[in-house]
Image: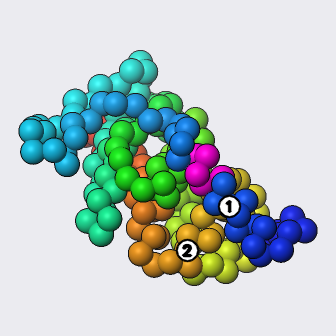
Amino acid sequence: MNDFGMNGDDLEQMYQEVILEASRDPHGKETFAPDLASESAGGESVVRASHEYCTPGESHQFNPTCGDEATVHVEVSDAEPHRIERLVWDGHGCSISQASLSVMVDLCAGRTVDEAMGLFADFHELMESRGKGLADEAKEDRLEDAVVFQGVSKYPMRIKCALLGWEGMRDAAARALAAKNAD
């Protein structure tokens, strides 16, 4: 991984700042899902496509280890190649899960489903690196700001936090495609 001429501590601090900034000002966060953490929460959110000629999909993810929770909503274009026209989420959790969701929205919204799934695979590989990063510089370049989660991958208990939203995006896109094929 490119160290930008910084020592390890400086680089780690820069990564932490990027994660904190992304969690403070999360991209793609909307309020649409019931708060499943509250006892009064009932039912499920209603999925409606806001884009004409799109099929919606939604996935709720929960990390019982730390309580992170996210519902990811995607709208996939009906035209080929299928494109993620809208990608939003609702939820709560630690700064890592919130920042990862925000960065995921920035990276995947507007891309084809295949491109988004490629980014999912690259991010998953980064999380499996246990702090070593990716050997493939092209993958790191594709991940853009998501490479800051390399430090998170050193901590097995935090990997689930970083992957929560990505798993939701993958599942929501699969649901949208399945609904499209059922028509």
* Quadrant of the image containing the C terminus: top left
Mark 1 / mark 2, whichever is N-terminal: 1
Residue 179 sits in quarter: top left
Q: Which mark is residue 153?
A: 2
Q: Which residue is more in the foreground, 71 or 16?
A: 16
Helix, strand or loop at disc 2?
A: helix
**At which x and y percent is residue 36?**
19, 45
**Tag 2: amino acid:** Ser
Image: magenta residue range: 18-22
**At which x and y percent is residue 21?**
61, 46
**At which x and y percent is residue 33?**
26, 36
Q: Which mark is residue 15?
A: 1
Whether 4 is drawn above or below 110: the answer is below
Q: Is residue 83 left or right of residue 1?
A: left
Whether 120 is drawn above or below 45: the answer is below
The colour mode here is: rainbow
Q: Is residue 134 left or right of residue 54?
A: right
Q: Is residue 68 left or right of residue 13?
A: left
**Tag 1: amino acid:** Tyr
Q: Give the spatial CA distance, label 1 vs label 2.
A: 12 Å
**At which x and y percent is residue 92?**
35, 47
Q: Which residue is more in the foreground, 183 or 67?
A: 67
Q: Which residue is more in the foreground, 100 or 51?
A: 100
Dot 2 crowding, Cα within 10 Å, few <14, some 14–19, many 20+: many
Residue 46 inside the magenta-drawn segment: no
Give the prevailing secondary structure in the magenta stretch. Answer: helix
Residue 46 sits in quarter: top left
Which residue lies at the image location 34% right of the left edge and 30% below the top edge? 31
Residue 76 visible at all: no
Q: Which residue is more in the foreground, 170 or 70?
A: 70
Which residue lies at the image location 19% right of the left edge and 48% below the top edge? 37
Which residue lies at the image location 54% right of the left edge and 42% below the top edge? 24
